[in-house]
């Protein structure tokens, strides 16, 4: 089976302090730009339902808007509880101006 990629937005819609929300087959994904690199993470905080893209981005971390859990964007690692676990990461790439997420 060949890799399949789905358009998740356009590069001009993403900035270091404004992540994008994307839904892939019912799964909420947040797309972040940190130091010029793109990262795609599970967008729902594992502690309680809150969209992390509505949280607070500070450099290479994002803080949950509800309970202050903090996650490292490049790795998905939970840095401050009550996150409960690390976030799932997704393959992301830039194809021209199109941001693409890999479909598993």
Image (cartoon, grey):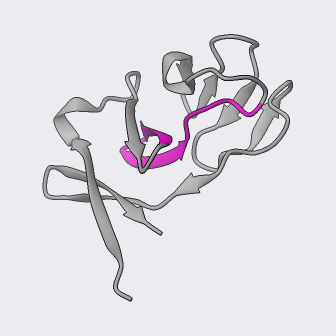
Is 88 situated above or below 52?
Answer: below
Residue found at the far top of this picture: 66
Image side of residue 99 versus residue 37, left or right = left
Quadrant for residue 96, please give it.
bottom left
Depth check: give the residue in front, 21 or 55.
21
**47 up-or-down from 8: above or below:** above
As rendered, which of 98 and 37 lies closer to the eye?
A: 98
Image quarter in which the N terminus is found: bottom left
From the top left corner, tell me how far across and down residue 86 is, in percent.
76, 45
Query: Would you say residue 72 sits in the magenta stretch?
Result: no
Residue lying farthest to the front in this orientation: 26
Query: Residue at the left extreme?
Result: 96
Point 74% across, 14% down: residue? 68
Q: Which residue is drawn at 56% across and 17% down?
A: 55
Q: In this view, does 27 lie to the left or right of 8?
A: right
Which secondary structure dominates the residues rendered in magenta?
Answer: strand
Toward which corner of the image does residue 76 lie, by quadrant?
Answer: top right
Q: Position of residue 32 (x, y in %)?
A: 43, 37
Comparing 64 with 103, the one in front is 103
Tag count: 0
Residue 76 sits above or below residue 20 on the image: below
Q: In this view, does 12 lie above or below 39?
A: above
Q: Is residue 34 left or right of residue 77?
A: left
Can you give x and y, in whole percent of width and height, for residue 37 in the image?
Answer: 40, 49
Residues drawn in magenta = 27-46
- For image coordinates 29% across by 32% down, the residue present is 14
Residue 92 in percent (x, y) is at 39, 57
Residue 31 within the segment the image draws in magenta = yes
């Amino acid at each position: 089976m060949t890799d399949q990629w789905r358009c998740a937005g356009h590069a001009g819609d993403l900035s270091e302090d404004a992540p994008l929300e994307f839904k892939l087959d019912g799964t909420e994904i947040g797309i972040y730009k940190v130091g010029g690199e793109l990262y795609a993470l599970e967008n729902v905080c594992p502690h309680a339902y809150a969209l992390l893209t509505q949280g607070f981005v500070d450099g290479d971390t994002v803080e949950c808007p509800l309970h202050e859990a903090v996650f490292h964007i490049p790795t998905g690692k939970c840095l401050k509880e009550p996150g409960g676990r690390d976030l799932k990461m997704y393959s992301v790439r830039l194809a021209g101006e199109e941001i693409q997420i890999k479909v598993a």
